[in-house]
Amino acid sequence: MTTVSLVDGFSRPITYLRISVTDKCNLRCVYCMPETGLPWLRREEILSYEEIAAVVLAAARVGVRAIRLTGGEPLVRRDVHRLVAAIAAIPGIDDISLSTNGLLLEEQLAQLVAAGLRRVNFSLDTLRADRFEAIARRPGLDVVLRGIKAAAAAGLTPLKLNCVVMRGRNDDELVDFAALTRELPIFVRFIEVMPVHENLELQRDAYVSSDEILQRVAAIGDLRPVPGPAGNGPARYFAFPRAAGAVGVISPLSHDYCERCNRVRLTADGRLRLCLFGDHALDLRSPLR
């Protein structure tokens, strides 16, 4: 029997599919969207769970093994656990993870774990409640922290915290975030702020390179390169001696990470994108329907 694999233009196997289950979000983070929000897709424009499962089935047959559900905020879509269960039942899929801001996780966690969710990435840009509301334009840090603790207690490890670093807004918390990895088995990943939608001025004024981030974090201890956890993708990881976790940096602007990319992306409206930075997309919704 001939085995067919999904490969990119450099003959690298594609094993990871990121799926946006919705474009909607319950936060309005300053680096992501305007305070008034964006024009959302109509319900009929978004892939159904059955259509998403059909794409995953096809992807699994050509070598995709890991699925990450994203948004927007994936948990604002009703009954996401149904989709997790459908994906978990597909032969060949070994790992299902979720990227979330954490506001709705605690109340849905039991259903998600029972359905087959394995890991969670949290978007968390500050450890201060007042600053959380300033960056996200919504309150809720206490709820997010409860969600993180609940995920850890449920065994959804390794836990990853993704922090978008912005000069003058949260860069003074770099050391606080990094220090968490000394005692806790978590991976704190610092991400360079990217130009998206209407944040071009913010990106210009607030940009902090990953090299500067690492230099500032190293002020509290020796950082050494270490292997990343499952699904590490473009991140580079470093750890303090005898630390329980690690610090990662994702450098979309200052360092070329294309050679470490092993994933493709399915948008909420059914377009397959081979590159986050590319304009080309393949319409899968039309043939599905």
Image (cartoon, grey):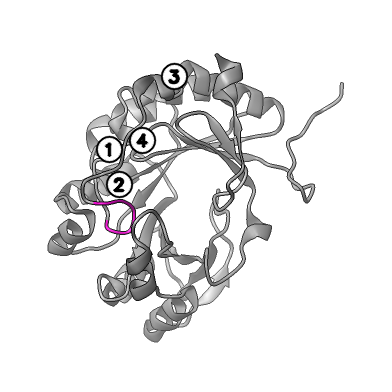
- The amino acid sitting under disc 2 is Asn
- What is the CA distance from the residue labelled 1 to the residue labelled 2? 8 Å
**Which callout, 1 or 3, points to the residue nearer the camera?**
3
Q: Is residue 222 above or below residue 108?
A: below
CB-based contact (under 8 Å), mark 1 and mark 3: no
Residue linked to disc 1: 105
Q: Earlier in the sequence, mark 1 or mark 4?
A: 4
Q: Nearer the viewer, residue 228 or 287?
A: 287
Q: Earlier in the sequence, mark 3 or mark 4?
A: 3
- The amino acid sitting under disc 4 is Pro
236 left or right of 185 in image: right
Q: Main secondary structure of the magenta part?
A: loop
Say which quadrant the C terminus sits in: top right
- What is the CA distance from the residue labelled 1 to the residue labelled 4? 10 Å
- What is the CA distance from the residue labelled 4 to the residue labelled 2? 9 Å
> In the image, which residues are magenta?
30-34
Residue linked to disc 3: 48
Q: Nearer the viewer, residue 280 or 240?
A: 280
Residue linked to disc 4: 74
- What is the CA distance from the residue labelled 3 to the residue labelled 2? 22 Å
Tell me the crowding category of disc 3: few under 14, some 14 to 19, or many 20 or more residues within 10 angstroms, Cα based: some
Q: Is residue 89 visible?
A: no
Mark 2 lies on a secondary structure that is loop
